[in-house]
Amino acid sequence: MTAAGGNSIAGSLIIDCHAHVFDAYMPTSPDAWTVPDYAFTVEDLLGTLNAHGVHFAVLSGLSISGGYNDYMIRALRQHKRLKGTAIVDPRTDLYTLERMQADGIVGVRLQLARQQTLPDFKSADCQLLIRRMRDLDWHAQVAVEGHNLRQVIDPLLDAGVKVVIDHFGHPAPEDPLGCDGFDAMLAAVDTGLCWIKMSAGFRLPGTAAWRDDPDGDLESVAATVAAELLRRVGTDRLLWGSDAPFVGYESRVTYEQVLASYARWLPDPEKRAEICRTGLQLYFN
C-alpha cells in the first residue's frame, strides 16, 4: 500500500489501537447518537486487518451499546492478537473486572463526548472504580471534547491512573494548537501517565464540514495536530488507531484511506515503527 505522496506503509509492523466490532443484534443505549444498520463482526475486522497488513488491534467499547461488552469480550477470548477496553458501571466489583482482565480487557473507556453532564469523579462510586483501575494497572481511555479534557483527566492522573486520550483530544477545529484541550494534553503527557491517540482524524472538523465542503481537505486539522504532537511529545507517548468501521462515516472513509493519512502524518517509517512499539508495550506487554 502506498499513501498519497508516495509514503509506503506496506511491510511495517502496525498496531491499530482503536477499532470496534459488533453483530447485527447489538443492543443500543437509549441515548445512542446513531444506530448502524449493519454488522462489523470480529471476522470482518480480522479480514480487514489481514488485507492491510495490520498485525494487532485494540477494540474500544462501543458507546452506542452502553455497558454491553459481551460480544467484544467473546472476541478477545478467541483472538489473542486483540485487546480491549470496556465501558463499565463504576460499581462493577473487583471479581468481574479481574475476569475481564483475564479475557483481554486492559482498560475502561470513558466515552464522554456529546454528554450534557460529566461524571463526578469525587463521588464514592467513581473513586472506587478509579482505585480498582489503578490496582489492576489499567488505563482510562478518555473521549471528551477538548474544552472538558482537564476536568476529566486531572482526577485520574492525580490518582495515579494511566490515561489514553482518544481522537487527538478533540481539539477546537478553529484553533487546534491554541485551545485549552491541546495544552491539557501536553501537561498530561508530562506526568508520565498519559498517551495520545492519533485516531479518527476525519471526525475532527465535525459533520458540518463534510456536508458543507465534501471535497475539501477534511483532515487538515488532524495533520496539523499530528505534526505538533510529534515535535512536542515524541513517539513514546503516541498511538495510532483507525476507528474502523468509521460509524457515521462509512460511505466516506475506508481503511486504506486512514492508513494513507497515517503515512502522510508520519512519513518516516521508523517513527511509525516506534509508535507501534509504544502500542505493543502499553497494550500487550
Image: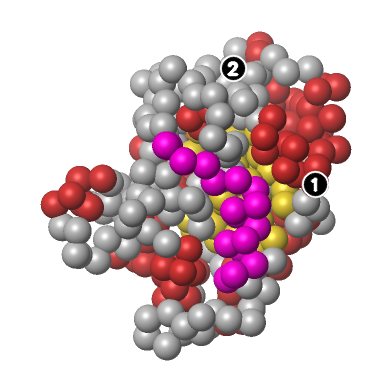
Image vertical order of residue 39 relative to residue 120, above or below: below
* Residue 28: in magenta span: no
Which mark lies nearer to you, 1 or 2?
1
Q: Are marks 1 and 2 in contact (CB under 8 Å)?
A: no
Which residue in the protein does label 1 denote? 78
* Residue highlighted by disc 2: 122
The reply, left or right, for residue 192 in relation to residue 175 is right
**Amino acid under disc 1:** Gln
Q: Residue at x 58, y 71 (%)?
A: 52
Q: Residue at x 42, y 44 (%)?
A: 247
> For the view shown, which residue lies furthest in the top direction?
124
At 66% from the left and 13% from the top, the residue drawn is 125
Q: Is residue 125 left or right of residue 256?
A: right
The quarter of the picture where the C terminus appears is: bottom right
Secondary structure beneath dot 1 equals helix
Q: Amino acid at mark 2?
A: Lys
User: Within the magenta stretch, is there residue 43?
Assistant: yes
